[in-house]
Image (cartoon, rainbow, N blue to C red):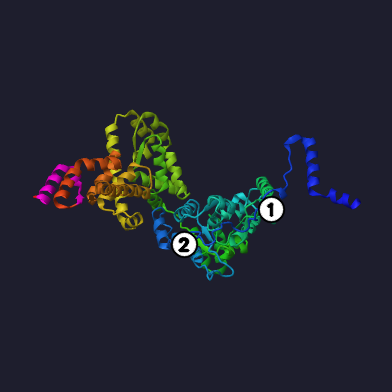
Amino acid sequence: MKKEKNTISHDPKKIEKELGEFLNKKFGANVKIISPSTLPRQETISGTSSSEKNKPLIDFNIKPRELITYLDQYVVKQTKAKSVLSTKICTHFNRIRHSQANENGLSKITGNIKSNILMLGPTGIGKTYLIKLIAKKIGVPFVKADATKFSETGYVGGDVEDLIRDLVKEANDDIKLAECGIVYIDEIDKIASSPSVIGAQVSRTGVQRALLKPMEETEVNLKVPHDPVSMMQELESFQRTGKRTKQVVNTSNILFIVSGAFSELSNVIRKRLSKQNIGFGSKIVKSKKENELLKLTKAEDLVNFGFESEFIGRLPVRCILETLNQEDLYAILKMPNNPVILSKRLDFSAYNINIIFTDEALKILAKRAYEENTGARGLVSVIEEALLDFEEKLPSHNLLKFTVTKEVLKHPKAHLKDLLSKQKFLKFNDLYEKALLDHKNYISKYINNNSKTLSVRHGLTLSQIRCDMIALYFCNNVMEIEDALKKIKNHQDSIKEIEIEVLKTYNLNIIFEEDAIDFLIEQFINHNATIQEILSKIYDNYYDGFNLIREKTGKDRFFLSKNALIDNETYLNDLIRKEIT
């Protein structure tokens, strides 16, 4: 009897009932017990998700030369850096694609070595910009962070493993895709332990050590142990399934790129080289510029700078960026896709003001930025300083055109007064039209010089007329060259749709000649024409004539030139006379 009582007292259902009654008395009906045994059980989620094991993770077939050509449209100089980054990044992702294609696993080797990259160079020369461009081009998940925000444990600052979790978010929770992403960490030189500080620097060396495993290969749990939200999600999952779930991200194919200015590294290198030389050699070392010294960087220099040897060992590829001189800064401003000028054009466009810069003005801005000694970042500062008063006052005076000239930069107050008085309206308008024409011709020449690459990329024949058309569209709209080309290509595709629609609807095979296509594109751009409007005109102006020729001769294929579109009556009369009589 005693044994039976003991058995009953340990009955889970009995305990659950008694506990439920107790909670009901204590807290009312708001608290209920949910037993895992009464809920459906699901399999534990383990590993890297995705049920489609044979599905390709990435579709990557970009060659290094293609990526370099793409970067050349946006980045001035940095030839070596573009070569190193393009080659190693393309090789990394093509290796992943190659491994996916080999289902037998022959491409897998023990001790996977990743080409993680260390970028060194002064501030403001485009390190982050380069990586953003590459990430945009290749289309893989990409996250960026500053090294200064991390701590070893994650209780202060951020946890380095949060970067991997952010990758999953960028990949729309596709873990497999996130495992082929890029992690970019800037300001990496800030986590080097300072040689001037005596004693352990846990916060800095701790971050380096925390990065060691993710940079090589490890599995990162998506659930954060100390995060209350993750704990609540885990509890909810356990109540639903009765089992603990586990989702992890493998970092073996995640590429890590780190960068920093390393402003004091040149002193470390100079000291090493001076020790190696005697006599006049040390004087030669002292005379070398900082960037020249960075090109001589060795692993021992980085260790002496404050990095642990294990950390440097996981960054086998080094990429040294060049400093920018005054001519380089001017070349940046002249590049059609440069974000500095495009951003300022967008600022004024927000007030319906078209702004354009003359060459003389760009050279002055480049000189001022060079004197600030902050690289390309200095361009933004000098432009903001020079145009702030104009940006403040012009929107309130209904001015639609603004030309930034040498006089604007040298005598801003006097020029602003003249603009607002509108007494020299015709002069300023002529100035704008001339600057616009010069800029359009420059852009047209740029497109023409790159026509071979752009034609292949967009499937668009680039005649001189079309180059001029794209250039004018680019100048009148705030966008990159690529977007202007896409717009023209979309219009060309619309014209092909018209040809197909006429064939389907009227059983007539009409073909627009190249000059007719250009003419119709202009109608789309300048007059906001629609496909339906053009189809309607084709029917009204040509159907009866084409149908007559078809009935008399059986011919149903007709070529339309620009002249045929402009003067349809003359075209049809000549065609009928030729085909019928």
Where residue 62 sits in the image (x, y, percent)? 43, 61
Of 121 and 180, the residue lying toward us? 180
Q: Which residues are magenta?
A: 556-580
Q: Can you identify the residue that label 1 sits on?
A: 243
Q: Residue furthest left?
A: 581
Q: Can you identify the residue that label 2 sits on?
A: 90
Of 3 and 429, the residue lying toward us? 3
Where residue 404 sits in the image (x, y, percent)? 35, 40
Where residue 537 sits in the image (x, y, percent)? 23, 41
Q: CA distance from mark 1 to mark 2?
A: 41 Å
- How would you rate the neighbour count of disc 2 (Cα within 10 Å): few for under 14, some for 14-19, many for 20 or more? many
Q: Residue furthest right?
A: 2
Residue 281 vs 329, above or below: the answer is below
Residue 348 vs 118, above or below: the answer is above
Label 2 is placed on what type of residue?
Cys
Tell me if residue 572 is in the magenta stretch. Answer: yes
> Which mark is nearer the camera, 1 or 2?
1
Where residue 289 sits in the image (x, y, percent)? 48, 59
Tell me if 156 is positioned left or right of 432 in this view. Answer: right
Asked if residue 559 shows in the view, the reply is yes
